[in-house]
Every structure is written in structure tokens, then in C-alpha cells.
Image (tube, rainbow, N blue to C red):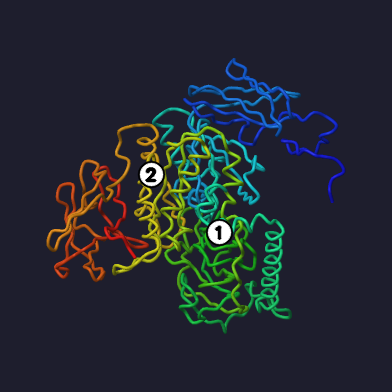
Amino acid sequence: MKPAFPILLAATGLGLLSATVAPAAVRLPRLISDGMVLQRDKPVAVWGWADKGEAVSVSFQGKTYRATTGPDGKWRVQLPALKAGGPYEMTFKGSNQLTLRDILVGDVWVCSGQSNMELPMNRVKDKYPDVIAAATNPQIRQFDGPTRYAFKGPQADLPSGRWTAADPKAVLQFTAVGYFFARELHDKYKVPIGLIRIAVGGSPAEAWLSPEALKNYPALQQRADQLRDSSYVVGVQQQERARDAAWYRQLRQQDQGFAKGQTSWTSPSYNAADWKTMNLPGYWADQGLGPVNGVVWFRKEVEVPTAIVDQPVRLNLGTIVDADSVYVNGQFVGTTSYQYPPRKYELPTTVLKPGKNVVVVRVINSTGRGGFTMDKPYELRAANGQAVDLRGAWQYKLGAKSEPLAPPTFFQYEPGGLFNGMVAPLLPYAVKGVIWYQGESNTGRAKEYQQLFSTMITDWRRAWQQPALPFLYVQLANFMAVKDQPSESGWAELREAQRRTLALPHTSMAVAIDAGEWNDIHPLDKATVGHRLALAAEREAYGDNVVAAGPLYQSHKINGNKITLSFTSVGGGLVAKGGGELKQFAIAGADQQWVWAQARIEGDKVVVWNEQVPNPVAVRYAWADNPQGANLYNKAGLPASPFRTDSGK
């Protein structure tokens, strides 16, 4: 039903005002708000909305700037280049008056990509407790843009968001990579640093392309055209919600752990004598159950010493594929709905008792291999440091078997949706540059990534009207199981596409193949990544003469049975980190049969060979999902980027 009269949503979100009754108040985008950080040393745009033809003034640092709204009700003024400092106030006058307070002028960085940029300090608090405790710094601030996709065109504003200054509590919600990056820049340049986080877990690069950029990709454009039909989107969402609800409802009904007329399997008094055993951590497809989907229950009797009873205790259960509900002595203590977050359940002091305790974990796996991730902590850990190891034999029983659940349509991953919903509302806010951590979701289509990513960078520079906008990005970290022989790798292909994107001017890449974890797509070492991005910024955005990257492959020459590699960014010289032989070099002849190679450093070059390959044609370095042991660095302590001298298939 259409409204009886035109309406306008007030910027404060306090209600609806009739546009025919009173003049529209001056309102501002979410980004222009209390506590904001404005970009120094370049013209700064400030904008908003009011009635068509309304005169608006902006007063800042003793000067007043004037504008008149256009036919679309939008107004904009441009402040001259500002010097770093603050805090300041800014006043807006039209039919009403608004005053913003606590404004700083410094450097503003957009922090974007997928989950490894989105990941907050809260997820790494156990690794960096001292950093968090010392995080009181009102000159480091974050604006956290909410996830929002839109398909009918660029949006004018964000639905929510505010600027927050760093302190030990607030910093827990800061992007971890961004905070380490900002802290280092602030320490060096002593100016306020503003972070604008617009990152969405799982998002592929094409979701961040503008409508103009999508025109270069017919298949993506066709999908974007389809998504402009809101009835189609709503229909898919309704259908999938009904399907998923039916799947979980049926699973619950069939789950023998909750069968009527028997003791619940969550109860410590339940008799599990007939349950089989399985060693955890591990996957049940490898230990008797096979590749089933549905509900599997796990149960373990644990001896708890008196010393950890009646004090804070955390139950650490690594990560679990996919969802879990956990009970201790029959009491529910926590649940997680998807596989990636670490399971860290704080137990009430009344739950544990001296002697025998029963831990029960109900795991739902909707598709793929279900189980408990290897090489993660599985323990009861008390505040006094004592721990009870939970690894080893667990009893298990299948609660209900089900057909796999089809994956949902993640509309936030669709072409153009995130640009329209999250990037467009930031324009034309002046920024210093972009830091980007993304690519995991494009590894299945790595061969197209260089063009796609390059298009996106150029597209953002056009949108911000900054052709030389510094764009600094993280190369994918090492991940997944280590392979003992050279092999093809989608992750290596993606890293190669990222390396080749350096052909674009004003870009820089932070190598992270030594900062990952084989069993976690979200490695905890965000300090190393933030540091390397900061080095890149110091060189690319601030013009400092620092070594900002590890060795980068430049060219090669074939001499007999040896291939000599030349590099840029040698940073005072090449070294094998830790000493010893260089590792993770592979060589092949015309048959493309890759074998491990010997390699030695000769000045600023590396010579590679294998006596079994008399006529080599190509070399690869660190060409794997997880190139563990790759140890070519420069003397500045930065790792070489993976590369290949062949063009690939």
C-alpha cells in the first residue's frame, strides 16, 4: 500500500516527517558525524541533504562555507586542505542547526575485503592481551560500516555506523589488521588515524565493482541485471528460508538424542555404554561413521581436579564443522552456528565439580566433512593456568542422518552489491588510501583474478576521483595441509595474480605466506600483516625511503642446466631465513614435470637446478596452498613473494 502523503526518513531515525508539513531539516550522512577524522592536506568534501533550493552553511575553524541544495535535495561544500589536529567542532545551518564535536584531522584509510580484514581484535585478544590493555588512544578511530548490499544502484547513505575512538573495550571491535596498521602509522607520524571498515566475510572481488565496471564483464553484468528485480531476490530468500527451516526442523524431530520417552543424551545420567569411541580432534568420515551429514553426538567423562573448581574456567573446543551445542554436566554452556569461530565457552563457576564431569557436544553438519579441526586447543583451562586436556577418545553416536543441505544464495557476494551498498555511500569522503585483504573467495577462479582485481582498483580510484589513490593489499596467507611434492594450487594461482597486479602504479603488496595457519583460514597473526601494510604505506603513501616488501621476481636466464633468477626489492641483500638451504624451489623441463630443486644465493640472484633436469625451462617458488618452509627473504626481514617463471596453462 502506498502512503497517503510523501514521507522522508529523518536522519536521526526517530520517526517519519511529512514533507508537505514542514521544511526538511538539514541532515548528514552517517559518516559525517561526531568523532569523525577528516583527511589532512587535501580538499575535503562535506555534504548532506535538505529541501530543494535551501541555503546551507558550514562553519569550521573560523570560516563559513555556503551551498544551495540542488533539485535532488543534495548540497555539498568543499573545505580547503586542512592541517592535522583537533579536536574541532563543525556547525551546519539551514532550517535547523547541527553541531558536530570532537572532530580530528589526520589520515583516513579505507579497510576493505573479506573476513581477514573484517576480523576484530576480539578474535585475537588471547594472542595480544597487552596490546588491547594499552589501546587507549583517542587519535585512532574506526567507523564500522554495516554489511549492506544493493542491486538497484549506488546508495546515498549507510543505514547505521558511527566513529569510535580506541580504548581497551572499544578496540575489541576494531579490524585487527587495521588497528595494527593504524597504531604503527600513528606512532611514526603522530597524526590522527581514521579507519573506515567496509569488509564482508566471504565476499568475492566482483561484489565490490561499480555498475560502470561490471559492464566489462558480460556474465557478471547479466547476473547484476537479474538481481535488480527485487521480487526475484525476495522470492529466492523466502524459498531458501523455508527449505532450511524444514531441514533443521526434520533433523530435530529425527534426532534420537532428544527422543521422547528416554533420558536426553545431554544428561550426565544417560547410559552411553553402547556408544562407540573416536579420537578427537578429527573428522568422523575418517573414523567409522563415513561421510554422513546430520547430527552426531560426542560425550566424554573428564576428571576435574579440585584446584580448578569454583573459579573461572574456559572450555576450549577448537573449531567445529559446522555447528555445535555444548553441555557440561547436563547444563547448556554455549553454541556456535558455523564452522569458523573458535569455540571458547566461559563456564559458570557452578558447573564443574571435583572428580567426574561429563562434557557433551551435539554437532550438526549440513554438508561436506564434519568434525573437530586438528591442531587446535581442546581443553578446560582455568584462570590459574591449570588445564585439563580433552583430546583423545570420545564416545560418539549418530543422532540423525540427513541428505546434505544445499548452500544458500549469499546475495552479499553477488556482482556489484557491496559497491552499491557500502562503497558508494562513502563518496566523496576524502581518504589517504585503501588497505585490502581479500582473495580467498576467488581462488576457484584464480586465472581471472588479475584482470578483475585490477579493474576494481581502477574503478575505486575513479569513484574517489583519485587516480593515484594508494592501494595496499595482502597476498593470501599459507593455508591447508602441506604437500610433500610440487603440485598445482588455486591458492598459488591467486597469489600470482596478486603479484602481477603490482603492474598497476601506486600499489603495494604485503606477503603473508609465513603468517598463516594450515588449519585456519583466519590466522591470528594480524600484527605481522598490519606491520607489512604499514611499511607499504610508509613508502607508497608517505614517500619514505623504507624497504617495504620482500624480494619480487623480476626475470630469469637459462644457462645449461641452471636457471638464474633476478629480483627487485632485495632490501640490502638476499638471505635464507634461519640459515641452511633455500627451500620450496621447484624446477621443470619442457614436459612440465615439477620436481624439488636445489637453490643458492649468488649476490642479488638465486641460481636453481636439479641434476635430473638437464634442460630446465621454468622455476616456481613457494607454489603451494601452504608453502611451509619457504625461506627466501631480504635482509630487512621480509619474505619473497611466491612466483613462477612459466605462464601456466
**Residue 597 in the image, given as x and y percentages of width and height:** 20, 64
Farthest-out residue, top: 62
Please determine whether, in this image, residue 410 is positioned above or below residue 199.
Answer: below
Q: Is residue 80 above or below residue 381?
A: above
Residue reaching furthest to the bottom? 274
N-term-proximal mark, 1 vs 2: 1
Nearest to the observer: residue 200 or residue 416:
416
The secondary element bearing badge 1 is classed as loop
Q: Quadrant of residue 333?
A: bottom right
Image height check: is 560 above or below 32?
below
Which SS class for mark 2?
Answer: loop
Total numbered labels: 2
Side of 572 relative to 310 (left or right) = left
Q: Position of residue 279 (x, y in %)?
A: 46, 75
Q: Which residue is mark 2?
A: 504
Q: Amino acid at mark 1?
A: Val
Q: CA distance from mark 1 to mark 2?
A: 59 Å
Q: Residues within 10 Å of mark 1 (few under 14, many from 20)?
A: some
Can you give x and y, in whole percent of width and height, for residue 169 in the image?
Answer: 56, 41
Disc 1 target residue: 309
The mark closer to the camera, 1 or 2, is 2
Q: Write the residue at 68% across / 70% down.
A: 243
Could you tell whether 518 is left or right of 71 in the image? left
Question: Hey, what amino acid is under mark 2?
Answer: Leu
The C terminus lies in which quarter of the figure? bottom left
